[in-house]
Image (spheres, rainbow, N blue to C red):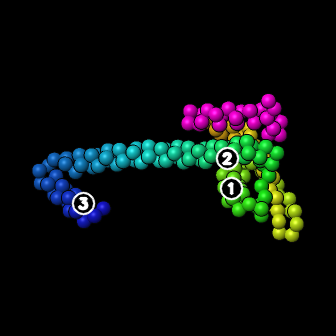
Amino acid sequence: MNIWTHLWFATLVITDRLLGTNIVERELIRLKRQMEAFENQATAIQQQMEELSHLLHVTQVELCVIYLRQRHILQPETWLRFAPAGNADDESELDIIIDRLVKHNLAAIRTEAISGQTYVYHLRPDWAAISDLMNTWRKHIDPATASWLEKIRNSENGKIHH
């Protein structure tokens, strides 16, 4: 409490004693109610922040799924294989995939040494876990992405059979 609050309460105590009123008690009750209201607001804000944080995570995973879908379309035979030494874009994209999927146990990655300091990375997404995560926010997910994810999840080894 600052000095003005202390002076305010000192004035209330003196007035309360001189006049025989319950001003201090009423003021303490009012302040207690105000504190409870602030605490309720803080709790609501914290819940909203947690919900938004979770939604951000799901959105990042969805972007990774969209990226993998694009790779599946453009490189159907090697879409889960990353060779950063041959492609600078692969390196930054692989870092994002590792950060958003592998570190959250939504995928595994296997490293294969090709020669010397050259490596190839094989991604193994856990489609069931990704799909379960995405289903928690199904109303926010692109329907085409959700449909593709279900096809992948229900297929063998990530290969879609038409």
As drawn, the residue found furthest toward the left would be 19
The residue range painted magenta reads 137-162
Foreground residue among 78 and 35:
78
- The x and y percentages for residue 11 are 17, 58
Circle nearer the viewer, 3 or 1: 1
Q: Which residue is drawn at 79% across and 35% down?
A: 160
Q: Is mark 1 on a helix, strand or loop?
A: helix
Query: Which residue was labeled with disc 3?
Result: 5
- Marks 3 & 1, CB-CB < 8 Å contact: no
143 relative position to 78: left or right? left
Q: Which of marks 3 and 2 is nearer the N terminus?
A: 3
> Is residue 24 rendered magenta in the image?
no
Q: Residues within 10 Å of mark 2 (few under 14, many from 20)?
A: some
Gap between marks 3 and 2 measured at Cα: 57 Å
Foreground residue among 29 and 74:
74
Q: What element carries label 2?
A: helix
Q: In this view, does 20 lie above or below 158?
A: below
Three-letter amino acid code of the residue under disc 3 = Thr
Q: Residue at x 69, y 53 (%)?
A: 97
Q: Which of marks 3 and 1 is nearer the N terminus?
A: 3
Query: Which residue was labeled with disc 1?
Result: 93
Gap between marks 2 and 1 measured at Cα: 9 Å
Q: Earlier in the sequence, mark 2 or mark 1?
A: 2
Which mark identifies residue 67? Answer: 2
Q: Residue at x 49, y 44 (%)?
A: 47
One can see residue 20 in this view = yes
Gap between marks 3 and 1 measured at Cα: 56 Å
Foreground residue among 150 and 46:
150
As drawn, the residue found furthest toward the top would be 162
- The x and y percentages for residue 56 are 56, 47
